[in-house]
Amino acid sequence: MHIHSKLPNAGTTIFTVMSTLATEHNAVNLGQGFPDYTMSEELIGHVTEAMKNGFNQYVPMQGYMPLREVLAEKIKYLYQTAVNPATQVTITPGGTYAIYTALTTVLQPGDEVIIFEPAYDSYIPNAEVNGAVPILVELKFPVYKIDWAEVRKKISPKTKMIMLNSPHNPTGAVLLEEDMNELRSIVKGTNIFICSDEVYEHLIFDDIPHQSILRYPDLLERSFVCFSFGKVYHCTGWKLGYCISSPELMKEFRKVHQFNCFSCHTPSQVGLSKFLKNKESYLSLPLFMQQKRDYFLKLMKETKFGMLESKGSYFICATYDRISNEPDKDFSIRITKEYGVTTIPVSVFYRSGTDNKVVRFCFAKRNETLEAAVEKLVTIR
Ligand code: PMP
Ligand code: GLN
């Protein structure tokens, strides 16, 4: 049989490659982004109770209504924007799926999508599988800020969408109010959609306010804003998330969604709807994760890595030019094998493989795990 590949450039995702290598070599895995500490007992309790109480059948394809309602309340409280839970919120099996569905909802063959690099690894394939063309804009190392003048130059009559991600994976950079104002002025009066990946909402540090699209009704009307319960509530294996959009766009999003997964895991939705009633469930998150970043940074001072800034997410990047000038992939593989610590090479987040000799560490780990990793990293000289 001959199959004409829809994604000829795609291999196996780096997260699976590096996690497999970590397991093979019994390495401390600071590569793939997942916590190794326990999630909330309270949330586990709510989900267990939901199953025992018979919440084990399909919910409507839009998601369990009380969960959508509590999300709308949270959005109103955090961003002062009214969102209708009936028409603007859809529960999805994870953030990745929400992003894929958003792109599939609007992209037609030949459309252009502005994607900032380094980019989370699903964005380019998601555009291409829909026949769209990624237009790449580089976030300049080492600060990784958006150059809006370059964005303006790359906008064309074919531009259909701009992909955003803040807090940013892999760099931990965050968008500021000035970025949002640039974006507003660029898209005003155009037919450009926005897909905003905000899966690291709440995981933002140093009291910086998260610049969600949800703060800006003029942007929300053209946006799909994607979130992940797994990422923020320390249960990445749940693969549950949601998308917020305007009623008009959400109507089309749901047409794609209903014939893909239809509806998502019911007990988790029921459990989350109770858990999120307590604002502490999310208000406690920025400091919790900031302490992890700070602890990891403190430990890493003893190593020869050059730590870059991380303002949010699970991640912090580091240069290793004081250790070696190997390509970052070789370096990541070698330190997994020889030193027992796994990282992610940042060049994989660039289509052209731009290698600034930077690796990404995930600090969403128990203190003991971070200590065990750094104990090995200090020996790399
Ligand atoms: N976007 C980014 C930037 C991510 O890092 C992740 C992490 N997996 C996702 C989307 C997907 O989230 P989920 O696991 O809920 O699909
Ligand atoms: N988002 C996670 C990361 O960047 C991984 C999720 C995945 O494996 N797809 O490490």
Image (cartoon, rainbow, N blue to C red):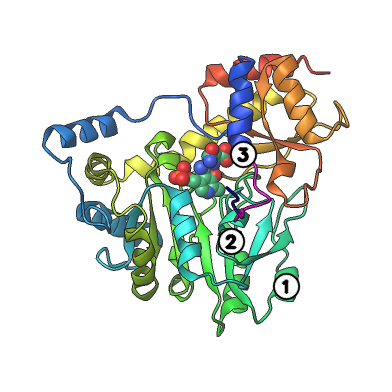
The residue closer to the viewer here, 252 or 10, is 10
Read off the residue under disc 2: 127
The magenta segment: 4-11
Specify whether residue 99 is in view.
yes
Where does residue 121 sit, x and y in percent of width and height?
61, 48
As drawn, the residue found furthest toward the bottom would be 189
The amino acid at mark 1 is: Lys
Question: Residue flagged by tag 2: what amino acid is it?
Answer: Ala
Give the residue type at disc 3. Thr
CA gap, disc 2 to disc 3?
Answer: 17 Å
Residue in view at x 33 percent, y 30 percent: 40
Q: What x and y, as percent, mark residue 266?
A: 23, 44
Q: Earlier in the sequence, mark 2 or mark 1?
A: 2
The answer as to whether callout 2 falls within 8 Å of ligand 1 is no
User: Does 19 appear above or below 282?
Assistant: above
Local secondary structure at mark 3: loop
Residue 374 drawn above or below residue 246: above
> CB of mark 2 within 8 Å of CB of mark 3?
no
Which disc number belongs to residue 154? 1
| Crowding at mark 2 (Cα within 10 Å: few <14, some 14-19, many 20+) | many
The spot of residue 305 in percent (x, y) is 77, 29
Quadrant position of residue 157: bottom right
- Apparent side of residue 370 relative to residue 64 in the rendered image (left or right): right
Q: Secondary structure at mark 2?
A: helix
Q: Is residue 106 left or right of residue 137?
A: left
Alpha-carbon distance for marks 1 and 3?
30 Å
- Give residue 221's mark: none
Q: Residue at x 40, y 61 (%)?
A: 79
Residue that label 3 marks: 12
* Total marks in image: 3
Instruction: Say which label, 2 or 3, has the lower sequence index.
Output: 3
